[in-house]
Amino acid sequence: MIGTPISKRPKGVKNRQTFGHWEIDTVVSSRGKSKGCLATFVERKTRFYLAFKMPDRTAKSMFSATEQLLTLFPKRSL
């Protein structure tokens, strides 16, 4: 298993109290022989939804889609 199970999420994530908690998934078409798919991102509080086309379901493609998501938001200084 990768990451934290849904049952172990902090209360703020479960209750959708704070912005910035994302659910990520892939969607693959059952039609044709294409290896392409979509990376989907849903922000839990606002339910803001984005999808990015990926050439395949590799980790490299998902990383690239995640980078695309991050470019849409301003960088925070630490």
Image (cartoon, rainbow, N blue to C red):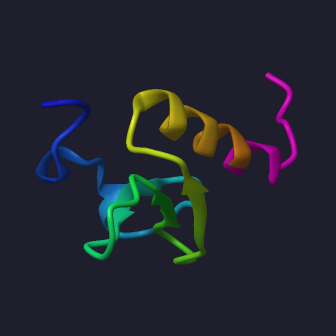
The picture places residue 62, in percent across and down from the top left corner, at 49, 39
Q: Give the residues in magenta.
A: 69-78
The picture places residue 52, in percent across and down from the top left corner, at 61, 60
Of the 4 image quadrants, the one containing the C terminus is top right
Q: For residue 12, what is the image quadrant?
A: bottom left
Q: In the picture shown, does residue 32 fall above or below 78?
A: below
Of the 4 image quadrants, the one containing the N terminus is top left
The front one of 49 and 52 is: 52
Q: Residue at x 83, y 35 (%)?
A: 76
Q: How many marks?
A: 0
* Residue 73 within the segment the image draws in magenta: yes
The secondary structure that dominates the magenta segment is loop
Q: In the picture shown, does residue 25 fall above or below 68?
A: below
Q: Residue at x 33, y 64 (%)?
A: 28
Residue placed furthest toward the front: 33
The picture places residue 7, in percent across and down from the top left corner, at 12, 52
Q: Judge left or right: residue 35 versus residue 70.
A: left
Q: Judge left or right: residue 15 versus residue 46.
A: left
The front one of 8 and 2 is: 2
Residue placed furthest toward the top: 78
